[in-house]
Amino acid sequence: MNKKIKSEAVDALFDAIMCLKTRDECYSFFEDLCTINELLSLSQRFEVAAMLKQHKTYLEITEKTGASTATISRVNRALNYGNDGYEMVLGRMDSQASDAG
């Protein structure tokens, strides 16, 4: 965990996110919290992370997501040297998909 972002305000934000129960609730909250561009940027990074985990090339990722090579590199660096947040969430999503399928 990055100690630079650890604060009561960030804790409160994360507590609020953990209260959300449905996708519709997420849309309502995040549309109020973020600008459209911020939300689209976050979703793009998440899509890039998923594609990198699937061993897609930068060219494939750029073509599908429109992400710049700088964004792809930043996400790739987080996957390789970050706090394993992407790994944790993507792994849980894979498990849930396997359980449901």
Image (tube, helix red, strand yellow):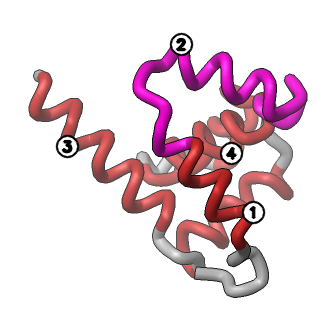
Tell me the magenta residue range.
17-39
Disc 1 to disc 2: CB gap under 8 Å? no
Instruction: Name the amino acid type tagged 4.
Output: Arg
Q: Which residue is label 2 attached to?
A: 24
Instruction: Name the amino acid type tagged 1.
Output: Ala
Q: Earlier in the sequence, mark 4 or mark 1?
A: 1
Determine the secondary structure under disc 2: helix
Instruction: Name the amino acid type tagged 2.
Output: Asp
* Residue 31 lies within the magenta run: yes
Q: Earlier in the sequence, mark 2 or mark 4?
A: 2
Q: Which residue is label 1 attached to?
A: 9
Q: Which residue is label 4 attached to?
A: 45
- Snapshot quadrant of residue 70: bottom right
Q: Residues under labels 4 and 1: Cα distance?
A: 23 Å
User: For this rendering, which residue is in front, 6 or 73?
Assistant: 6
User: For this rendering, which residue is in front, 83 or 75?
Assistant: 83
Q: Residues under labels 1 and 2: Cα distance?
A: 24 Å
Tell me the tag on residue 95: 3
